[in-house]
């Protein structure tokens, strides 16, 4: 397993690849990194990411499409505003049509 610094950097590499208008989950990122049971560590990486300029942290949500990381943004509604600006509908802190917007790095990044 990677050390924390390398793991965080690997998480950040994946998050930077999430297309605009799409979202992924902590668990999907962990799975893509071969650390399926490390979704909480992905969350820690995301909490630490807010000092990175222009980083698309708003595109990472929980497995139910809930904006569980919103409290780590500078404004309580910043995460939702960024998602809405990308064409994603959010109602009561939950992405609507979650499966339509879901981007799974394990399958999307597969190289054949």
Image (cartoon, grey):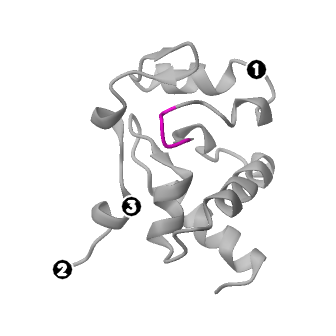
Q: Which residue is mark 2?
A: 112
Residue occupied by mark 1: 76
> Quick one: 60 or 40, which is closer to the camera?
40
| Residue at mark 1 to residue at mark 3: CA–CA distance | 27 Å
Q: Is residue 62 above or below residue 43?
A: above
- Residue neighbourhood size for the residue with mark 3, other residues' Cα within 10 Å, grouped as few (<14), some (14–19), many (≥20): many
Indicate the position of residue 89 as horizontal and vertical percent values.
42, 17
Q: Secondary structure at mark 1?
A: loop
> Label 2 near label 3: C-beta < 8 Å?
no
Q: Secondary structure at mark 2?
A: loop
Q: Residues within 10 Å of mark 1 (few under 14, many from 20)?
A: few
Q: Which residues are magenta?
A: 61-65
Q: Which mark is residue 105?
A: 3
Which quadrant of the structure image shows residue 101?
top left
Question: Spatial distance from mark 3 to mark 2, Cα to Cα?
Answer: 14 Å
Secondary structure at badge 3 equals: helix
Residue 23, by quadrant, is top left
């Amino acid at each position: 397993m990677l050390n924390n610094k390398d793991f965080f950097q690997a998480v950040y590499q994946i998050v930077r690849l999430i297309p605009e208008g799409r979202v992924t989950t902590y668990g999907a990122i962990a799975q893509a990194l071969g650390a399926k049971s490390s979704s909480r560590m992905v969350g820690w990486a995301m909490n630490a990411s807010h000092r990175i300029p222009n980083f698309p942290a708003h595109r990472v949500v929980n497995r139910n499409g809930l904006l569980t990381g919103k409290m780590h943004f500078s404004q309580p509604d910043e995460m939702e505003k960024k998602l809405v600006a990308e064409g994603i509908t959010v109602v009561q802190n939950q992405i609507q049509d979650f499966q339509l917007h879901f981007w799974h790095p394990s399958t999307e990044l597969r190289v054949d």
